[in-house]
Image (cartoon, rainbow, N blue to C red):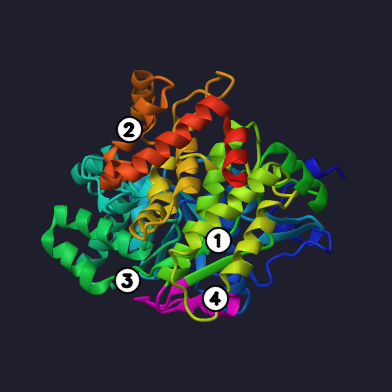
Amino acid sequence: MRPGSMRLGRANLGRLPPAVRRPAYDRSRITPGIVHLGLGAFHRAHQAVVIDDCLAAGAASWGIVGASLRSPDTRDALAPQDHLYTVAVRAAEGTEHRVIGALLDSVVARESPAALVERMVDPAIRIVSLTVTEKGYCHTPQTGDLDERHPDIVHDLNNFDAPRSAPGFIVAALARRRALGAPPFTVLCCDNLAANGHTVQRIVTQFAALRSRELGKWIVDNAAFPSTMVDRIVPETNDADRDAVANALGMRDAWPVMTEPFTQWVVEDRFTAGRPDLAAAGVELVADVKPFELMKLRLLNASHSALAYLGYLAGYETIAGTMPDPHFARLAAQVMEEAAVTLTMPAGTDLAAYRASLLKRFANPALHHRTWQIAMDGSQKLPQRLLGAMQDRLARGLPIATHALAVAGWMRYVSGLDEQGRTIDVRDPLAAEFAALAREAGPVAERLAPALLGVQKVFGPLGADPRLREAVTTALGRLYTEGARRAVETLVSA
């Protein structure tokens, strides 16, 4: 039978090859305990895998209902196959395939906001988790506060029962639970925000207080927003990936996810209405996530962004494609080394081993993580990934040349033209503002760098620091005169 003639689904699990792992529990006995906002590839390769392990250990009331806030694509792909899907774990030695059954159902918020709110109001739902990316929180990354002028927030304040944004859905559901006398759920953020639990609590309570001061206070007093750190590289799935999975399964999976062997989830152990046994599934439950969060943001995410912007400009399509270039490999290592001095880690943390593991992961030839994908939404990412470490190094009187080149790479990228004069498909909430500034400044570092450093939503007061301005302007000038590849070589050879 050709792989494409049969589709993954509950009825066909028994036909999978023996090497393919499948749910080790009776899905008919599983009930939902989690609603997840942001049903993308990362969640399905990370948190859902952990919950799948919890279900296999007997936590039958912790199944997941997924919600796509806008697009129906994931629901349309997974619903016909009973929400089963494949995680393909790729390493240089080969690929392992596992079918995940933790996702029980999915909804599309734009189609029926009331239906999603109703699922979140159900007292059986004790956790609402999120992977909506940094921009999905409708906040100002530099301050961590709600952006009250964001179009979705303006809409939600005037359409409280038919929200569009993640904060709007959370507050609408919590308000209903309060009115019904039901306990609040735990809000579990799994996105790369600084102090993500505290940040999301601030955003949600600020939004709630705009509706009702009492509601905002009730959320502060009763709901839990544990901070987390998540780590797993999950590239976009393409048609070649689907074909490879179909061949391995002997049947078609409309939307498998590709990932790496490494996975990490650190969670502040603070929940209002219980949780599954996450520790038994490999989750690190801690009292304070912040050191681990900063470690990941400033070592992994910062070097990833540096490779993405500068690698894209140099013509590299994937992160793995940049790593055989010794200068780019050194760039990644140098970003990590310079950020490491800004970290204070718990005793026993081996930062050198962690940095070495990151370089190995980036070089994984089986993982096709596109530089363009990582470059998306840089205005939301730079404050957490690069600017915090730069601010800390400046406070210590340390140089920032390596981070400055990464920021300059972002500036060259969002200007919208690559080194050959071709248009870059810039995906960012502030893309139009950046394009306008780039048109006015032209390809002149002394004009473009100050213009972009003046964007308060990204740089805040740090953009006015003369040391930062000089370092970034110098780096951007090198990108224009030398090109990205030569600029990186000059930096790491100095």
**Cα distance in 3D space between marks 2 and 4:** 39 Å
Badges 1 and 4: C-beta atoms under 8 Å apart?
no
Residue receiving disc 1: 231
The residue mark sitting in front, 3 or 2, is 2
Which range is magenta?
267-288
In the image, residue 355 lies at what x, y percent? 60, 62
Distance from disc 1 to disc 3, alpha carbons, whole Å, reads 22 Å
Mark 3 is on which residue type?
Ala
- Give percent across and percent down for residue 253: 70, 47
Mark 2 residue type? Pro
Secondary structure of the residue carrying tag 1 is strand
Residue 125 screen position, x and y as percent: 40, 67
Task: Quote the CA–CA distance across marks 1 and 4.
Answer: 16 Å
Specify few, some or many for label 4: CA neighbours under 10 Å numbering under 14, 14-19, or 20 or more: few
Q: What residue would you read off at disc 3?
A: 224
Neighbours of disc 2 within 10 Å: few (<14), some (14-19), many (20+): some
Write down the residue under mark 4.
349
The answer to which quarter of the image holds residue 482 is: top right
Q: Toward the viewer: 309 or 238?
A: 309
In the image, which disc is placed on residue 450?
A: 2
- Measure how far apart labels 2 and 1 are at the Cα level: 34 Å
Q: Relative to residue 395, is residue 350 drawn left or right?
A: right
Tag 4's secondary structure?
loop
Amino acid carrying label 4: it is: Thr
